[in-house]
Image (cartoon, rainbow, N blue to C red):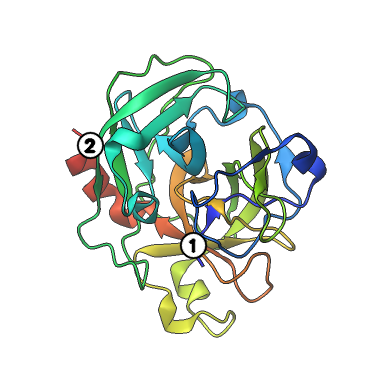
Amino acid sequence: MLKCVILLSVVACAFGAALPEGLLPQLDGRIVGGVATSISSFPWQISLQRNGGHSCGGSIYNSKFIVTAAHCLQSVSASVLQVRAGSSYWNSGGVVSKVASFKNHEGYNANTKVNDIAIIKLSSTLSFSGNIKAIDLATSAPANGAAASVSGWGTQSSGSSSIPSQLQYINVNIVSQSACASGSYSYGSKIKSTMICARAAGKDSCQGDSGGPLVSGGRLVGVVSWGNGCALANYPGVYADVAVLRSWVVNNAK
């Protein structure tokens, strides 16, 4: 299932906000073991919003462009989109920028989720600070088992309609493309060459985190894409492999 909101089994629902009806697909999954954090620890993280409500995550590539998932930008116009950067809270603080335009990878396939990456061009330039920073794109995939983190806002139980106001994160470990497609897990041929996976016992990314960052070694290595449920032992979270798709971002984010 697509991973459009970070789902965390913590009690932050108490201070969450309801998702606007119809804003997000009804998707499975949750992040278990998530921890509330500050944007200063993840200053590249943004909230991509439709009609003022949190829809997906994204990462700051430079002062004018955001990297996110192509599936976040289906059947939508730039006029209803905005990006909030520099805040630990999706619904307040930081800087809100309108979206001038966006571009999905030409090879994106909604059925297979291959090439699930997109760029967003902002209407105004971001001013970098301690809470707003760009993140470098990975030039090579991290090693199998490498430490990584995923951050975002999202529901905290499967099927919930509430999301925490404050940014959440989890620590995971990289599962290489070849390992994720192997018999050790249950995806098999669904794992394509433009994908990378990550997992940790009882942890995963899911709804509303789509487009958000998978970071390892201080670089953006993945974009939250899809998965089968969440935190299931044989089904790691699946991400667009940034190292493989890097040249597309570099060539188009100009």
Q: Is residue 92 left or right of residue 240?
A: right
Where is residue 42, by image quadrant?
Answer: top right
- Badge 1: residue crowd in 10 Å (few <14, some 14–19, many ≥20): many
Q: Which mark is residue 2?
A: 1
Label 2: state its secondary structure. loop
| Marks 2, 1: nearer the viewer | 1
Q: Which mark is residue 203?
A: none
Name the quadrant of the C terminus: top left
- Badge 2: residue crowd in 10 Å (few <14, some 14–19, many ≥20): some
* 94 is higher (above) or lower (below) than 222: above
Q: Nearer the viewer, residue 149 or 218?
A: 149
Do the residues bearing badges 2 and 1 touch, measured as CB atoms within 8 Å?
A: no
Question: At 58% from the left edge and 41% from the top edge, which residue is drawn?
Answer: 152
> Which amino acid, mark 1?
Leu
Q: Give the residue pinned by disc 2.
A: 253
Question: At 47% from the left edge and 78% from the top edge, which residue is drawn?
Answer: 181
Q: CA distance from mark 2 to mark 1?
A: 24 Å
Picture coordinates of residue 34, whole percent (x, y): 72, 46
Question: At 48% from the left edge and 54% from the top edge, which residue is drawn?
Answer: 142
Q: Is residue 187 left or right of residue 235?
A: left
